[in-house]
Image: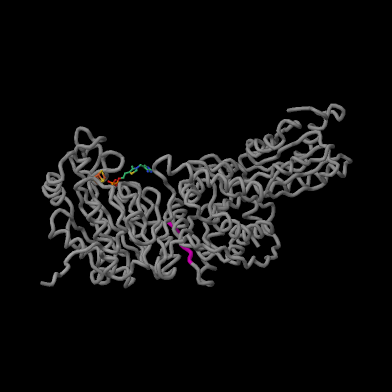
Amino acid sequence: MKGNEAIAEAAIRAGCRLFFGYPITPSSELAEYLARRMPEVGGTFLQAESEVAAINMVYGAAGSGARVMTASSGPGISLKQEGLSYITGAELPCVVVNIQRAGPGLGGLGPSQGDYFQATKGGGHGDYHPIVLGPASVQEAADLMMEAFDLADRWRLPVILLGDGIIGQTMERVVFKEPSPVRTEKPWATTGTGRRGPGAKRNIVQCWGLTPELLEPICLREQAKYEKITAEEQRWDTFQIEDAEALVVAFGTSARICREAVMQLRAAGLKVGLLRPITLWPFPGKAFQSLPTSVRGVLAVELSMGQMVEDVRLAVNGRLPVRFFGRVGGFTPSPEDVAERVVALLDEIPAKKAQGVTA
Amino acid sequence: MSEKQVFSRTKGLTGVPFHYCPGCGHGVIHRLVAESLEELGVLGDTIGVAPVGCAVLISSYMNCDMQSAAHGRACAVATGVKRALPDRVVFTYQGDGDLAAIGIAEVMHAAARGEKITVIFVNNAIYGMTGGQMAPTTLPGQKTTTSPYGRDVSSAGFPIDMPQVLATLKGAAYVASVSVDTPKNIIQAKKAIKKAFEVQMKRQGFAFVSVLSPCPTNWGMGPLDAVKWLQDNMLPLYTMGELKTPEEAVASA
Ligand SMILES: Cc1ncc(C[n+]2csc(CCOP(=O)(O)OP(=O)(O)O)c2C)c(N)n1
Ligand code: SF4
C-alpha cells in the first residue's frame, strides 16, 4: 500500500469516523482514500474550503467527543496552526498528519523534515506542545497512526504524525495491527446536557481566561500535563549502539538512510550505531542519558538545515561533540554521503581524547 | 384576586449577570435565542458556538453546552459539531467583525454546503470588543477609531450586506434580517430566530438571522441616541425582512 493510504486505513481501523481536509501534494491520496472509505463505514469525509476551516471543524468534532483527524503538508499545516493552538488550549484530542514537503514558502514537492520546529515547538501562539510521532516506514506509519488516536484521547492533546513525501508516497507491505479496544471516556464533551442524563451540568469547551488570575492556573495545569507526557511517553529505537564509537541520530526517512550507512560502515569494520527518535515531542532525552561509554561523537542527520540537532545538543548537554549533516530542497543524502560524514567525525575526534571532549 | 404571571426569566439563560454596556443589543438578542431554544424544548440537545468579540462570554449565559471558537471560525467549528452529532441543534452567535470580515469564508461555505446549523449574526456596524474600529458593516462616512475621518468608500470600500449575499446561495434555506430597536421589531426578531431553529430541526438547510444592534459605547452615544442612530442610518441601508424561506429555497433549487 502507498503510505498515505495505509495511514488513512489505519485511522479508520482505529475508529476515526470524521475527516476534514483540503488537498495538497504530497498528502492528497490520504484525503482521496478517505473520500472513498468514510461513506463505506458510515463516517464523514468533508473537503473544507481551506485548512483554516478544516482544523476548526476538527475542533468542533473533537469537542463533541468524536475521533477526528485532518491531514496536510507544510503550507497547509501552517494555516492549521491557529486551530492547533486553540485545540491544545481547549484540551481536545485529535490527530493531524503532516506529509512534509520542502519549504519554506510554497517550496517544492520533495521529501523534507523542515517542519520539525513547527511541529515540536508548538508552532502556533502560546505555550503548548502537541505529541509528535516520526515514522520511518509505511508499516510504522500505520501502527503509529492507530496509537495516535489512543494517545490523543489519553492526554487530550493533538497528536501529529510527522511524515514526509517518501513515507506518504512509497508503496510497502503493511500488516494492520488489531486496534486497541480501550476507549477513554469523554465526560467533558459537548453532547447536549439532556443527553448526559438528568441534572447534567453544562459542558463548555474553551481556551481562554481573560485575566492572569484565571489563565495562569490553566497554563500551569497544562504544563504539568506536558511534564507527565515527557516522563511517560518518550520512545526511540536503537541499532547497533552497544559498542558504537560514532552515534548517528536521525528520525523518519533520514533514519532509514542512516541505517543503511551504519550497515555499510559496520561491514567496513567501523563501530557505528543509530539512535532513532520515534517521539519527536517529547524528544527522547532519556536515550542519551545511558549511551555506551564507547561513544566519541554524535552526528545528527536531517532533511533540513538543522532542527532536531538542537534537541540532540540539549540531550547530550555538552558531554560529547555533536555534528550536523543535512540535505534540503527535496534532496535526500545517500548512505555513502552519511558514511563519509561519520568517518570525518571519527577522524576529527581521536579515541584517546574522547573523555571530557565538548563540542 | 388571582395573579397571572406574564413574564419570567427564561430557562435558556443561566442567570449570570451580563457584562454588556447599558443599551447594548447583545443582551436582548441573547434572551431571544435562549427563549427560542426553551420554547422549542431543545436546550438539552443544543450546542452553541461562541465568537470572539463582545459576545465571547456567551458561554457563561446560555443554559446549554457551548464551544468557544477562534475569531471568525464559528461556522467551521459548528460544522464539526453538527457532523459529529447530526441530531443535535447547533448554532453560532457572531458579531459583524467576526462573521463578515475574518470569518466570511467560513460562513459563505457553511451556507453553500447547506450546513444544518443556525447562525445568529449581530451587526452593530463596528468592532465592539477591541474598542470601536471599522467593521465591514461600518456605514459610509461613519467615524470609527480606524476611520477617523469617516469611512471613505474610495479606499475602505463599501459595507457588506450579509443577508443579501448569503440569500444568493442555494444551500441557505432561511435568511432573515431583523433589528432590536423597538419592542415591535424585537418581537419580529424573536420570530425569525425561532424560525431559524425550526428550519434547522426540519433539516431544511442553513439558517441565518442578521440582527441590527446598537453599540452605544463605541458609537459614542447614549442608549436612546444609539437606537435613533440605528433607525436613521442602518435601517435604510441594510436589506430587512425575510429574504429567503425554505419554500423559496426549494422553489429556486
Ligand atoms: C485572529 C484574531 N484577530 C484579531 C483579534 C482581536 N479581536 C477581538 S474581538 C474583535 C472584533 C470583534 O468585533 P465584532 O465581531 O463586530 O463583535 P462585537 O465586539 O462588536 O460584538 C477583534 C478584531 C482576535 N481575537 N483574533
Ligand atoms: S462595546 Fe458595544 S457591542 Fe460591546 S458590550 Fe459595549 S455596547 Fe455592546
**Residue placed most toward the observer, A163 or A17:** A17
Q: Residue at x 67, y 35 (%)?
A: A314
Q: Residue at x 73, y 33 (%)?
A: A322
- Does the segment drawn in magenta span residue A47? yes
Residue B134, image quadrant: top left
**Residue placed most toward the observer, A10 or B248:** A10
The percent coordinates of residue A268 (x first, y second) are 88, 41
**Residue placed most toward the observer, A275 or B17:** B17
Q: Is residue A46 above or below residue B229?
A: below
**Residue B215 horizontal side relative to residue A151, left or right:** left
Q: Residue at x 87, y 44 (%)?
A: A267
**Residue B224 horizontal side relative to residue B76, left or right:** left
Q: Locate the C terminus of chain A by quadrant.
A: top right
- Does the segment drawn in magenta span residue B233? no
The percent coordinates of residue B87 (x first, y second) are 40, 70
Q: Is residue A64 visible?
A: yes
The percent coordinates of residue B121 (x first, y second) are 27, 55
Q: Residue at x 32, y 70 (%)?
A: B201
Q: Which residues are magenta?
A: A44-48
The percent coordinates of residue A351 (x first, y second) are 86, 30
Name the magenta segment's main secondary structure: strand
Q: Is residue A253 visible?
A: no
